Amino acid sequence: MNVETLTSNLPAFFQCLAECHFEVLTKPEKRTEPINETQLKGLFDRLTELALSDVFETVGSCNPWNLAGLGRDEVRNAAVLKWLLSPRGDHGLQAELLRNLLADIPDFPQEPSRYCRLAVEDCPDGLRDSRVDIRIDDPRNFFLIIEVKIGASEQSDQLRRYCEIAAACARDGRPWKVVYLTCRGSAPTTAGEFIDDVVPISWSRISEHLRMIVRMRKGGHEISNFLANSFAKHISSF
């Protein structure tokens, strides 16, 4: 090709090129489906379940409450029991254990209200000498004291004094009781005239409640079930 001819024709070529219209081929936009939150949650729950199952198979019969040093210490075991009884506790059992405990008390309310509050190592009357292990105060519903025993014996007039405290705290007309929690569900010896207001319950009974709650739960969290079962095993040895 003659170079002079090519050079002279270039302006005309670019002019024609500028006037051309080319069809631009693009890939069709792919439609993105919205995320199904229910399916996504199900996937995460399943992955968590699989991961935890491997963890629990690894730890085997390991009991975290023994590792935490609870042993037979009444104060420490009372603190864990109070946590599991609390409807607002982060244990995942909601109010199930408390409902089971209330069902063991004759002629007593069996459903806690949303105002129910629990305290451990509490002095309901403000006096340090009258400190109780667990206080369950449900305004306009019921008042309950739990005296925890594992190795210690009753002090002089101990349960009678606790009954007097409970009666004073429930002077608004609420039903009240004192639960005497011992290794064998022994009858109290210091209740005096309040003997009918003291309800003996054994640690093994609490253990039975926890195991039953875990068995009956559907879709309960593995960690929650593990903690409940391991505490049930721990207290069944008392």
Image (cartoon, grey):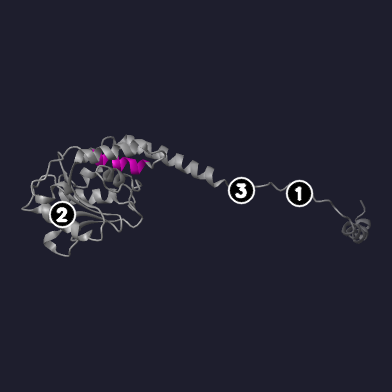
In terms of sequence position, does the residue under pointer 1 or pointer 2 come before the other?
A: 1
Q: Position of residue 188 (x, y in %)?
A: 11, 45
Q: Is residue 21 above or below residue 67?
A: below
Q: Residue at x 58, y 47 (%)?
A: 35
Q: Are marks 1 and 3 in contact (CB under 8 Å)?
A: no
Horizontal arrangement in the rendering, residue 40 relative to residue 162 (left or right): right
Magenta stretch in the rendered image? 222-232
Q: Position of residue 222 (x, y in %)?
A: 37, 41
Q: Nearer the viewer, mark 1 or mark 2?
A: 2
Judged from the image, the secondary structure of the residue bearing numbered disc 2 is helix
Mark 2 sits on what residue? 163
Which label number is shown at residue 26? 1
Mark 3 sits on what residue? 34
Assess disc 1: are there few (<14), some (14-19) or many (≥20) residues with their C-alpha within 10 Å of its C-alpha: few
Q: Residue at x 13, y 59 (%)?
A: 130
Judged from the image, the secondary structure of the residue bearing numbered disc 3 is loop
- Prevailing secondary structure of the magenta residues: helix
Q: Position of residue 233 (x, y in %)?
A: 23, 38
Q: Residue at x 17, y 49 (%)?
A: 197
Q: Nearer the viewer, residue 31 or 93?
A: 93
Q: Quadrant of residue 184?
A: top left
